[in-house]
Image (cartoon, grey):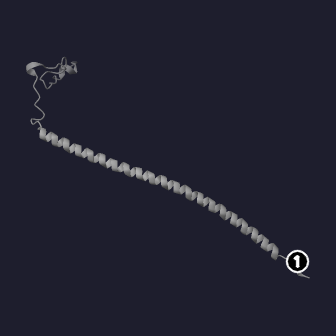
């Protein structure tokens, strides 16, 4: 009962009929090697190949045209974005100028209010005379 596992199990058979073990990686030659059947018994005719090539060419040209239109649209959008950024800068400059003018006007109004209050103010001691 001390026999090894290899002695107890029968050898496995390979597809070529050779048993596994020593020399199982031997490549059969001659009669023992069977030829594989052709994968396709029909070879496409030249007309079918030409039609397939024509269809693929059409598809590729459509894809190229589609990408060209997308690139044109992208260029147009980038140009619009550049114009919008310029317009934004102009508007920011205008807003800053208007805010500066507003603060100057507020300062003038405050000065005028002070002058007006000084003109209208009478000292108390003059009020009793």
| Mark 1 residue crowding within 10 angstroms, few (<14) / some (14–19) / many (20+) | few
Instruction: Name, please, the residue furthest toward the top.
Output: 22
In what quadrant of the picture does the C terminus appear?
bottom right
128 or 26, which is in the foreground?
A: 128
Residue 24 vertical placement versus 125 (above, below): above
90 vs 70, nearest the viewer: 90
Of all residues, the one furthest to the left in this rendering is 31
Q: What x and y, as percent, mark residue 27?
A: 16, 20
Q: Where's residue 32, x and y in %?
A: 9, 21
Side of 121 relative to 40 (left or right)? right
Up the image or down, 21 lies above or below 59; here it is above
Based on the displayed image, in which of its 4 quarters is residue 128 positioned?
bottom right
Residue pointed to by mark 1: 124
Quarter of the picture containing the N terminus is top left
Marks counted in the figure total 1
Q: Is residue 81 left or right of residue 127?
A: left
């Amino acid at each position: 009962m001390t026999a090894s596992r290899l002695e107890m199990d029968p050898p496995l058979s390979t597809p070529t009929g050779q048993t596994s073990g020593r020399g199982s990686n031997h490549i059969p030659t001659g009669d023992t090697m069977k030829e594989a059947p052709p994968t396709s018994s029909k070879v496409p005719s030249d007309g079918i190949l030409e039609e397939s090539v024509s269809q693929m060419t059409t598809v590729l040209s459509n894809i190229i045209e589609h990408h060209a239109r997308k690139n044109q649209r992208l260029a147009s959008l980038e140009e619009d974005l550049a114009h919008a950024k310029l317009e934004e800068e102009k508007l920011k400059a205008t807003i800053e100028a208007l805010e500066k003018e507003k603060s100057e006007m507020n300062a003038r109004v405050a000065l005028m209010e002070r002058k007006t209050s000084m003109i209208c103010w009478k000292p108390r001691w003059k009020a009793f005379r």
